[in-house]
Amino acid sequence: MSFNCGNCNGETLPNVQVLMASNVQMNIAPSDFEIISQSKIDSLTLIFYKDNLIYYVECMGRSVKFIPPTVDDALKIGGGKKKPPTSFILFRKFIQECVSSLGLRIPRDKLSKHIKQIWQDLKKKIPQLERHFQDVTRNALRQYNKFNLRIQQQIYPRSTSSDNTKINVNHSNADSHDINNLIHDLFPAIL
C-alpha cells in the first residue's frame, strides 16, 4: 500500500504503511505524569513535572521542556576559565533558562526561592535526577582539573653554604649581663 503525502507534489511514498483501526479496542498506556514540585510564591506558581520520562517547567499554563545538562553543558558555564558550578547552581542555571524561554520576568530573589523549593522537592521525589546533577558536576570538575592544572612544580636552585655565612656562638658568654638586658628590653612581660 502506498500513501499520498500532501506536500509531495502528488508523489507516493511506497514504504509507508497506514494502519487503520476499525472496531478494535486499543490499550493505550497511561501517561507517566507526576508533579515533582509546585512552588507558589506570592501569586506566581512554578511547576516542575515529569510526563513520560520528560521533565517540564510550567508557569501560567505554558510549559517548556527541561533537558538535564551534560558534562559539556557544565563546562560551558564557566567558559573554561572558571571551575564548573555545583550541582544546585547548575540546576538553578537550567531552570532560569527555562523561565526565560517562557518569557517570564521574575525578580531574582523570588526566582531563587522557587528554585530552592523545587530542588528540595526533587531531592526527595527523584533522587536519581539529583545524582545525575552531582555526577555531571563531579565529572565536569574532574575534566576541568585535568586540563587546567593549578598546581605547578617550582624548582628553586639550592644555594651552597659557605664558611663565611656561619655564625660562631660562644656559649660561655650567653649569660652575660648585656644579653640579659637585651632580653628584658625585648620581652618585659616574660621576665
Image (cartoon, helix red, strand yellow):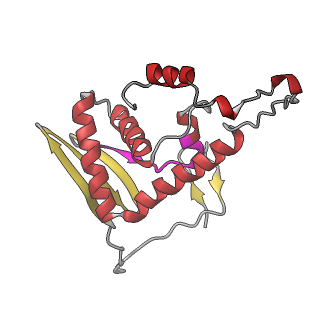
Q: Nearer the viewer, residue 52 or 28?
A: 52
Q: Residue at x 25, y 59 (%)?
A: 35
Q: Is residue 24 above or below residue 164?
A: below
| Relative depth, front residue between 165 and 145 | 165
Report the side of 14 relative to 103 (left or right): right
Query: What residue occupies the far left of the structure in this picture?
Result: 42
Determine the residue positioned at 31% across, 51% down: 119
> Residue 69: within the magenta?
yes
Q: Is residue 117 visible?
A: yes
**Is any atom of residue 52 visible in this view?**
no
63 left or right, relative to 42: right
Tell me the quadrant of the picture where the N terminus can be found.
Answer: bottom right
x%, y% of residue 174?
62, 31
- Per the rendered image, the range of residues in magenta is 63-74
Q: Quadrant of the C terminus?
A: top left
Seen in the picture, residue 143 relative to 36 is either above or below; the reply is: above
The answer to which image quadrant residue 64 occupies is top left
Residue 47, placed above or below residue 75 = below
Q: Foreground residue, 184 or 68?
A: 184
In this picture, is 33 found above or below 110? Answer: below
Q: Position of residue 115 (x, y in %)?
A: 29, 43
Q: Is residue 179 magenta?
A: no
**In the rendered view, does 146 fall on the left or right side of 62?**
right
Q: Tag count in the figure?
A: 0
Residue nearest the observer in this picture, 77 or 105 = 77
- Could you say where residue 50 lies in the image, as x and y percent from the top left? 34, 59
On the image, the x and y values in percent for residue 86 come to 45, 45
